[in-house]
Image (cartoon, rainbow, N blue to C red):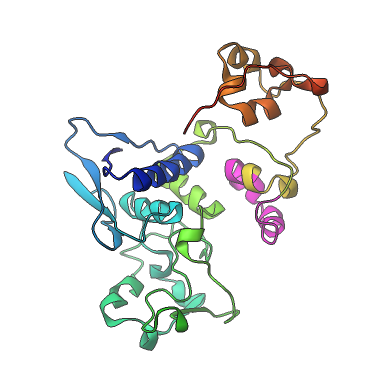
C-alpha cells in the first residue's frame, strides 16, 4: 500500500512505529508513494483522528490531528484504512457489551452504530474486547472521562484500556492475516524474552490455543506461557542462515534478535561476543 506522510517529525516517527507493527506481524507493506494513483495521504488537522474504511481509490485522506500522535491510534486508523470497522460496531456486539446511549455525545453516536451481518464481516472470529479497533469504556462521553459509554455485560467493572495505550491483540493479527491471505512463512521472526508482556492474560490466551494460532505475536509477547524461550545457555544457532546473516553484519544491525537466535555465529556464547556494535535507527 502506498502512502504520503505529513511533514511533522514527531507524528511521522509515530506513524513509522505503527507501520513497523504491521510489517512485523502481517504480510502488509506500506511504502512511500511516488506516482501511484491509489494512495493514503496522512494529514494533520487541528484535531481529530479518522479514516475512511477500506480502499476507496485515488487519494485517500487519513487524519491524525493533535492528540492523535500515539502508536495505538496509528494502528487504529490504519486499521480502518485496510478495511476494518470498530469492533464495537459488530452485529453481535449486544452479546458482549452495552452501549449507554444517554452518555454518548450526540454528534458521535454514529461511531457506536451496530452494523448488520450483511454490512460487516466478523470473519467467524469471537468478539474481542482487547482489539485495537475497540473503544474504551469512556469514549466520547458527554462529561469527558466522568461517564461511561460502554460496559461489559459479564463484568460491568471490566476496564477497556484507551486505544492510544494499546497494541495489536492476537486476534487483530489473526484477522488481518486472514483478510489479506498472509501465510505464517511471510511473518518475520521475532525476539524471545523469557517473560510475558501481558502477565494477566497470556496464560489464558496460551490455554485457548493462541500460541499456535498466532505464533509470531504470541512468541514475542507471551514467550513464557508459550514455552518458546528455550535454554539461554545453549550455544547453537536456531536458523540455518545464521552464519550468512552474521557475515553481512546482522549481529550488529539486529543486535537483540541475532544474539538470542544466532549465538554461535555471533560468537556470544560463554561470555564472548563480537566487538563491533553499531547503532541503527528505525
Residue 179 coordinates in the image, percent (x, y):
41, 47
Residue 183 coordinates in the image, percent (x, y):
50, 36
Q: In which quarter of the image is the N terminus?
A: top left
- Give the magenta range: 196-218
**Is 236 left or right of 119, judged from the image as shown?**
right
| Residue 35 sits above or below residue 158 on the image | above
Question: From where the camera sits, is residue 66 visible?
Answer: yes
Depth check, front residue: 94 or 253: 253
Q: Quadrant of residue 39?
A: top left
| Residue 150 sits above or below residue 270 on the image | below
Check residue 84 for magenta coloring: no
Check residue 213 for magenta coloring: yes
Total numbered labels: 0
Farthest-out residue, bottom: 102
Q: Residue at x 37, y 75 (%)?
A: 140
Q: Residue at x 54, y 31 (%)?
A: 185
Depth check, front residue: 132 or 246: 246
Q: Residue at x 35, y 74 (%)?
A: 112
Q: Residue at x 58, y 32 (%)?
A: 189
| Residue 209 sits above or below residue 110 on the image | above
Chief secondary structure of the magenta span?
helix
Depth check, front residue: 48 or 10: 10
Q: In which quarter of the image is residue 260?
A: top right
Residue 208 coordinates in the image, percent (x, y):
67, 56
Q: In which quarter of the image is residue 144?
A: bottom left
| Residue 248 sits above or below residue 211 on the image | above
Amino acid at each position: 500500500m502506498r502512502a504520503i506522510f505529513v511533514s511533522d517529525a514527531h507524528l511521522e516517527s509515530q506513524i513509522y512505529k505503527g507501520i513497523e507493527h504491521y510489517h512485523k506481524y502481517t504480510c502488509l507493506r506500506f511504502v512511500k508513494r511516488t506516482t501511484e494513483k491509489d494512495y493514503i495521504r496522512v494529514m494533520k488537522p487541528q484535531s481529530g483522528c479518522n479514516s475512511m474504511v477500506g480502499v476507496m481509490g485515488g487519494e485517500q485522506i487519513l487524519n491524525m490531528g493533535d492528540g492523535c500522535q500515539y502508536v495505538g491510534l496509528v494502528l487504529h486508523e490504519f486499521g480502518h484504512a485496510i478495511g476494518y470497522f470498530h469492533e464495537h460496531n459488530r452485529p453481535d456486539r449486544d452479546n458482549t457489551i452495552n452501549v449507554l446511549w444517554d452518555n454518548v455525545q450526540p454528534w458521535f453516536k454514529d461511531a457506536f452504530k451496530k452494523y448488520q451481518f450483511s454490512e460487516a464481516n466478523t470473519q467467524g472470529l469471537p468478539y474481542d474486547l482487547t482489539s485495537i479497533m475497540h473503544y474504551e469504556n469512556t469514549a466520547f462521553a458527554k462529561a469527558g472521562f466522568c461517564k461511561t459509554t460502554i460496559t461489559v455485560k459479564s463484568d460491568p467493572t471490566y476496564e477497556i484500556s484507551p486505544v492510544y495505550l494499546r497494541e495489536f491483540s492476537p486476534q487483530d493479527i489473526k484477522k488481518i492475516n486472514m483478510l489479506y491471505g498472509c501465510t505464517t512463512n511471510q511473518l518475520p521472526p521475532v525476539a524471545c524474552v523469557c517473560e510475558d508482556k501481558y502477565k494477566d492474560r497470556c496464560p489464558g490466551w496460551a490455554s485457548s490455543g493462541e500460541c499456535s494460532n498466532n505464533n509470531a505475536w504470541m512468541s514475542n509477547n507471551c514467550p513464557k506461557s508459550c514455552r518458546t524461550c528455550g535454554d539461554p545457555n545453549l550455544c547453537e544457532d536456531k536458523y540455518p542462515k545464521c552464519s550468512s546473516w552474521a557475515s553481512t553484519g546482522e549481529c550488529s544491525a539486529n543486535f537483540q534478535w541475532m544474539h538470542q537466535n544466532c549465538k554461535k555465529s555471533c560468537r556470544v556464547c560463554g561470555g564472548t561476543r563480537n566487538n563491533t556494535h553499531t547503532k541503527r535507527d528505525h
